[in-house]
């Protein structure tokens, strides 16, 4: 429920969408204070004991670019997480995630 926990680098914390019956359509938008340069992201799903709310697919959008649909696999469920390549080095000033499948 705390979006900042999505980016703190700790696998024992997470962003959660809250008590909704269907997380599809929930979004997280990140705007760093200064643009960050990277060629990939790493997504690790919530590691809480007993967590049963696996995300199967997400849309990722960098800045105002095209949306990239990512099918999440088993690597997203355990550290270090699933690597999502961005197609080359980009300067990220806005990053948007939208849950598209659970």
Image: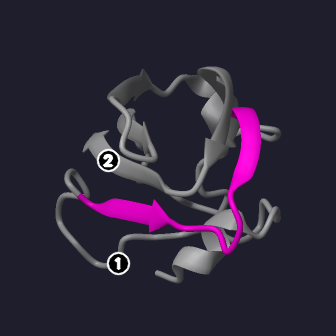
Q: Which residue is mark 2?
A: 99
Q: Secondary structure at mark 2?
A: strand
Total numbered labels placed on residues in the image: 2
- Residue 41, located in which quarter of the rendered image? top right
Mark nearest the camera among 2 and 1 is 2
Residue 56: in magenta span: no
Q: Which span of residues is magenta-colored?
A: 26-40
Distance Cα–Cα, label 2 vs label 1: 13 Å
Q: Residue at x 75, y 37 (%)?
A: 38
First in sequence: mark 2 or mark 1? 1
Q: Residue at x 53, y 69 (%)?
A: 15
- Residue 48, located in which quarter of the rendered image? bottom right
Which class describes the residues within 10 Å of circle 1: few (<14), some (14-19), or many (20+)? few
* Residue 15 seen in this snapshot: yes
- 4 up-or-down from 90: above or below: below
> Please, what is the dominant secondary structure of the magenta stretch?
strand
Which class describes the residues within 10 Å of circle 2: few (<14), some (14-19), or many (20+)? many
Residue 100: % across, % down: 25, 40
Q: Residue at x 41, y 40 (%)?
A: 61
- Residue 50, located in which quarter of the rendered image? bottom right
Q: Secondary structure at mark 1?
A: loop
Residue 36: in magenta span: yes
The quarter of the rendered structure image containing the C terminus is top left
Q: Which residue is mark 1?
A: 18
- 1 up-or-down from 49: above or below: below
Q: Residue at x 35, y 37 (%)?
A: 59
* Residue 102 seen in this snapshot: no
Which mark, by number, is residue 64? Answer: none
């Amino acid at each position: 429920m705390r979006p900042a926990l999505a980016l703190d680098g700790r696998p024992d914390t997470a962003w959660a969408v809250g008590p909704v019956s269907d997380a599809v359509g929930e979004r997280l938008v990140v705007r760093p204070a200064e643009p960050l340069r990277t060629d990939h992201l790493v997504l690790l799903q919530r590691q809480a004991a007993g967590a049963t709310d696996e995300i199967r697919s997400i849309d990722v959008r960098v800045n105002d670019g095209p949306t990239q649909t990512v099918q999440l696999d088993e690597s997203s469920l355990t550290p270090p997480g699933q690597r999502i390549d961005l197609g080359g080095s980009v300067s990220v000033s806005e990053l948007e995630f939208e849950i598209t499948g659970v």
